[in-house]
Image (tube, rainbow, N blue to C red):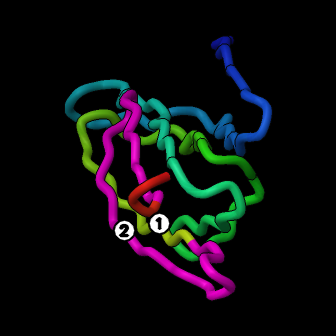
Amino acid sequence: MREREITIFAGTETYVDLRPQKKSDIKGLTEFEPAWITVKVPDDAVIEINGRRTRSTGPVRTFETPPLEVGTTYHYTIRMTYTEGGKKVSRLRRIQFRPGEETIIDLRPSGL
């Protein structure tokens, strides 16, 4: 039996994948780890990751990916929508990240 420790932070979304790791024909067991993506946004912003709206709130939001194959680079598209001067403003950014690492993205308008 394999144990796994998971840390969950208040105000964040956490995905846990408990499927067994797959075996690689060449290297034996393939290693999987989550990645962490921290996004800095205005307080009222809505964030979508790959088209899926998130539920977290606040100016700094951290998301944990499901376990991903170590040694591979992944990409997500992040859309942030907020209200400025009574108008909806949207920013879109394609980010790249690697399992086992934290990526910090600042989508705040200048001056915040």
Tell me the residue that label 2 is attached to: 93
Q: Give percent across and percent down for residue 47.
A: 61, 65
Q: What residue type is labelled 1?
A: Ile
Q: Which residue is drawn at 60% across and 57% down?
A: 42
Residue at the (48%, 43%) spot, across then down: 37
Q: Where is residue 39 in the image (x, y as percent from the top left)?
A: 50, 48
Queried whether the magenta region covers residue 79, the answer comes back as no
Q: Residues within 10 Å of mark 2 (few under 14, many from 20)?
A: few
Residue at 44%, 75% in the rendered image:
91
The N terminus sits in image quarter: top right
Give yes or no for contact between labels 1 and 2 (Cβ–Cβ under 8 Å): yes
Segment tinted magenta in the rendering: 81-108
| Position of residue 40 measured from the top left corner of the image (x, y, whole percent) | 51, 48
Secondary structure, magenta segment, majority class = strand
Q: Is mark 1 on a helix, strand or loop?
A: strand
Q: Relative to residue 82, is residue 102 depicted above or below?
A: above
User: In the rendered image, which residue does mark 1 sit on?
Assistant: 78
Graded by Cα atoms within 10 Å as few (under 14), some (14 to 19) or many (20 or more), the crowding at tag 1 reads: many
| SS for callout 2 | strand
Is residue 2 toward the left or the right of residue 27 in the image?
right
